Image (spheres, grey):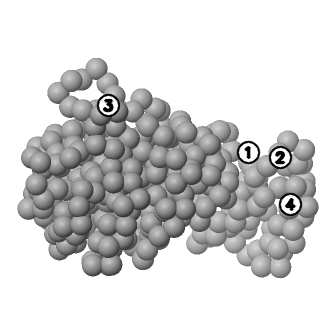
Amino acid sequence: MIAVLKKNTTEQQMSTLVDWLRAQNLDVHISQGHNYTVLGLIGDTSAIDMDLIASLDIVESVKRVSEPFKQCSRKFRPGDTVIDVGGVKIGGGHFAMIAGPCSVESREQIIEVAKSVKAAGATLLRGGAFKPRTSPYDFQGLKADGIELLLEAKKETGMPIVTEIMNAAHLPLFEHVDLIQVGARNMQNFELLKELGRTDKPILLKRGLANTIKELLMSAEYIMAGGNYRIILCERGIRTYETYTRNTLDLSAIPLLKELSHLPVVVDPSHATGNSKLVRPMALAGTASGADGLMIEVHNDPIHAACDGAQSLTPEQFAETATKVLQIRALLAE
């Protein structure tokens, strides 16, 4: 349920109403816009008299949120959420480029890539330390050592780091990670999502291989239900019957997610296509579709990459792509 307060409502009047609502065993989320303040009521609202609240002088309107995803709904919070990741803002007009290798392989590799992508305009460094792989015989990542190498690259470049978590038991290792990624295979790992809801870390939540937009938002709701509202959604392609690409990038999801939710949305064209030749056009298309950022895999030697070399750009290719992305952004701003 949401209650929209009138423009001339005083702080004291709002505080009195919020205190009363909390006395009804409800959590109240306050979203203040230019013209209105919206109170999002979380909990069992079935016993709340909507007509009583609507009759108050300071209340403009009261309505129930029909979507099952309440807290990430645009109705719950009309304005865009802006997520601060180590000083880099994402959402609400702030655009971020997240770049780096699929997996951290060595100190030399991650630092070289970090320096090159930063010079090209990347604002966050990605790199896998724990790698979920289809085959148990494939490279599984350097794990805790990989995170240490990412932190070294952060120290060298000043870039906030992004890496994927696979198990809630690993959370202590992520203490100094700026943005925790939940991969596509874990989008509906609800126990993991609950644990992340108890943290104060920003979360990058990837859409599952065959999950709907509604299911993605419900997974975000799991995290928000635990009290963590710092979530970035990621469209990374879904599995279809097409075989020429690794997945099918659902560009329509970007404007739809931004209509349904106030959370920022980024696009991962690398995992969506699985083909480095397609990364640049899909990155441009995702930008033009209104994404708040891109997540692109970059490797200094893709042919010899331990993981996903076929979809990785070279630093030079990333620099060319970043230049075109900024040109698209400039056109959208006109």
Q: CA distance from mark 1 to mark 2?
A: 9 Å
- Disc 4 crowd, CA 10 A, few/some/many (<14, 14-19, 20+): some
- Give SS at disc 4: helix
The residue to which callout 3 is attached is 135
Question: Mark 1 or mark 2: which comes first in sequence?
Answer: 2
Q: Are marks 1 and 2 in contact (CB under 8 Å)?
A: yes
Q: CA distance from mark 4 to mark 3?
A: 52 Å
Q: The C terminus appears in which quarter of the rendering?
A: bottom left
Where residue 105 sits: x, y (%)? 24, 56
Q: Amino acid at mark 4?
A: Leu
**Looking at the rendered structure, which numbered label has been put on residue 64?**
1
> Measuring 83% from the left and 46% from the top, which residue is drawn there?
45
Q: Quadrant of residue 161?
A: bottom left
Q: CA distance from mark 2 to mark 3?
A: 47 Å
**Looking at the rendered structure, which numbered label has been put on residue 21?**
4
Vertical arrangement, residue 7 with respect to residue 165, above or below: below
Q: Amino acid at mark 3?
A: Ser
Mark 4 or 1: the one toward you: 4
**Looking at the rendered structure, which numbered label has been put on residue 45?**
2
Mark 4 or 3: the one toward you: 3
Question: Mark 4 or mark 3: which comes first in sequence?
Answer: 4
- Give SS at disc 1: loop
Where residue 27 sits: x, y (%)? 78, 58
Q: CA distance from mark 2 to mark 4?
A: 10 Å
Q: Nearer the viewer, residue 96 or 327?
A: 96
Q: Does residue 320 appear in this view?
A: no
Question: Mark 2 or mark 3: which comes first in sequence?
Answer: 2
Q: Quadrant of residue 204?
A: bottom left
Mark 1 or 2: the one toward you: 2
> Measuring 28% from the left and 20% from the top, which residue is drawn there?
241
